Image (cartoon, grey):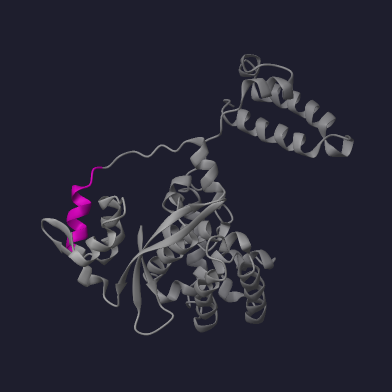
Amino acid sequence: MYVAVLGEGRPLRFELRRSVPLDGGFGFETLASLGEDPGRMVRFDRFGISYAEELLEALAHMDLDMDELDEAFAPFAPQDFRDRAGRSRTWTRTVLTRTQEDAIRALHPFDRRRMAFMRSGEINLNRIDEVSPKLFLSLMGKSRDEIEQLFLRLERSLPMEEVRGYVHAVFNLQRHFTSPAARTMPEALDPTGLDEAFMHEFCALWDDADFAFGLGTGARTYLRRYACLHFDFDFAASAGFERIFHDFMNDFRRPRPRPRTVAPERVRELFGMDMAEIRSMTRREFARIFRKKAMSMHPDKGGDHDAFVELLETYKRIVSSKPE
């Protein structure tokens, strides 16, 4: 459940919406109109959150979770109320299942890049697959409309000097350039080339049915703002050496992904031996076994490409857990 800001006209209008499952994803439905001032529907005080009778009557016929309603209006709460709520919240450890991790990795790359930049501020997002999936947990179970409303709120907190870097990162414009500057100093690139790269990625996203799922052409209304962010903002004048140094130091702070477990029966099929035999080997001994298998399974030798890739990935996962 979320409060949507409708900015097509002036003044702004607000609606209470929620994401609903569709065949293959999520759409949304409108629960109540909040008019031009959602604040008149809610009150925040030291006793908690209370709602106007008008809103409660509009929602009376629905089986709604009041905690979800509180979460929807939380962004409109005054700072002192949010501070009190944060102090009273009990921390719990989140442990993701394999199904959840796979679903998070299947999120649209544009959404993952946006969230990664918002959390890290890094322009070079080449290693986004190594980021903990928990970072993207807030995107799960949401319709395209709810996700875009989320990023509308988050982007309001972007400093003006980071806007162009944000667009460069989330549209993955660096992939259009061979210069190392594309990863760390996009302001050093040819402006015409940057504009062409942006339009290429923007048009691809504009026509991306997977991105627009559940919202149709309405998704384009949300995308228009990125053209303004690209063409109306300039890169900040920053010292390139400081940025390179920052990226270099942060490289040591990035958490390395834990190797996934490998099914024992698949290990025997690939290497012709079980995990107990492999554990008794040194890295060098196991590497010799791998090289023999790789030579026989290599696509250039008539082997299957997917099987070869699986052999390589399985080797990497096993060897990463073996001592030197």
Q: Residue at x 70, y 19 (%)?
A: 268
**Residue extending furthest left?**
46
**34 lies left or right of 252:** left
Quadrant hosting residue 32 = bottom left
Residue 153 vs 134, above or below: the answer is below
Q: Residue at x 31, y 54 (%)?
A: 62
Q: Residue at x 66, y 64 (%)?
A: 175
Residue 288, given in percent of the width and then of the height, sits at 75, 25
Quadrant hosting residue 189 = bottom right
Magenta residues? 80-90
Residue 211, given in percent of the width and then of the height, sits at 57, 61
Q: Nearer the viewer, residue 291 or 224?
A: 224
* The magenta stretch spans residue 83: yes
Residue 121 vs 269, above or below: the answer is below
Residue 104 can be seen in this image: yes
Q: Nearer the viewer, residue 309 or 243?
A: 309
**61 lies left or right of 227:** left
* The magenta stretch spans residue 178: no
Residue 98 vs 181, above or below: the answer is above
